[in-house]
Amino acid sequence: MVKAVIFDMDGVIINSEPLHRYAYNRMFEDLQIDVPAALYESFTGQSTINICKRLVEHFDLNEDPESLVAIKRKHFDYVFDNDNDFDLIEGVLDLIKHYHDAGITLVLGSSASRAGIERIFERFNLNPYFKAKLSGAELKASKPHPEIFLKAADASGHAVSECVVIEDSTNGIVAAQAAGIFSIAYDSFHSKNQDYSKANLVIKDFKEITLDKLQKHFTNI
């Protein structure tokens, strides 16, 4: 039986991909580098610091990864504060409330920075629904390593066999599977060229995983 649900944030709770794409593209312009689409798409689900480490290595940049993080954050902060259309993904708040009201423990397992997580949770008043929030940027390993989901399951107070992960990236699904946790891939318009073949369940609408439906999927694996 499902007792805890671990949510990714970017691409699952918030439609942040356009904001991140804007910030990264401005950073690429500042650095005068040309990042191919395939390389950019491979970043999905990874922390900013790990992405910047990859960029420094791939392009043999003189800047250190931390400097790249600061550049990207500057551009992201600008668009975050000025994009009035930025909102939660359709249906996710209803799902969060539905699980919370049913007594399901909710935990966030995101590759975003702690500051970024707190800004989102404060902006959309999500704190009352979540028992814990984990930032992959604070951990030793980034997705697809399972560390964040193992720690999220531990923070929930339930066994991994009683947890579910909702993700939108290849890296996130691989991380959940490596942690031994039932994984749900949210296949959204903004999740470009991600591989969901290893997910236990693939959905396009959060109405597909109301608690009764989720429990049925969970018990049928």
Image: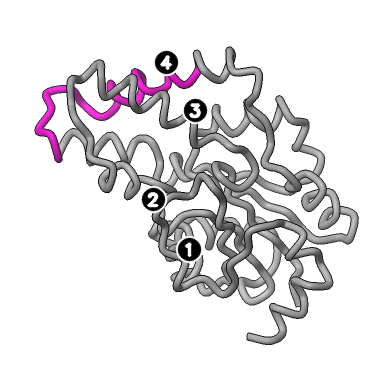
Looking at numbered disc 2 in the image, what kind of residue is underneath it?
Ser
Distance between the alpha carbons at the discs numbered 1 and 3: 22 Å
Q: Nearer the viewer, mark 3 or mark 2?
A: 3
Q: Nearer the viewer, mark 2 or mark 4?
A: 4
Mark number for residue 142? 2
Considering the whole magenta stretch, tell me its main secondary structure: helix
Whichever of callouts 2 and 4 sits on the residue coming sooner in the sequence is: 4
Whichever of callouts 3 and 4 sits on the residue coming sooner in the sequence is: 3
Residue at (81, 39) in percent of width and height: 128
The boundaries of the magenta stretch are 58-77
Q: Is residue 80 magenta?
A: no
Left or right of residue 135: residue 22: left
Q: Nearer the viewer, mark 1 or mark 3?
A: 3
Distance between the alpha carbons at the discs numbered 2 and 4: 22 Å
Residue at (57, 68) in percent of width and height: 183
Looking at numbered disc 1 in the image, what kind of residue is underneath it?
Ile
Residue at (80, 64) in percent of width and height: 210
Q: Nearer the viewer, residue 30 or 132?
A: 30
Secondary-structure class at tag 4: helix
- Cβ–Cβ under 8 Å for marks 3 and 4: no
Whichever of callouts 1 and 4 sits on the residue coming sooner in the sequence is: 4
Q: Is residue 57 above or below residue 85?
A: below
Residue picked out by circle 4: 74
Residue picked out by circle 1: 173
Secondary-structure class at tag 2: loop
Looking at numbered disc 3 in the image, what kind of residue is underneath it?
Leu
Q: Is the N terminus in the top left, top right, bottom left or bottom right quadrant?
A: bottom right
Residue 82: where, in percent of width, then height?
A: 58, 13
Residue picked out by circle 3: 19
Distance between the alpha carbons at the discs numbered 3 and 2: 21 Å
- The quadrant in which residue 144 appears is bottom left
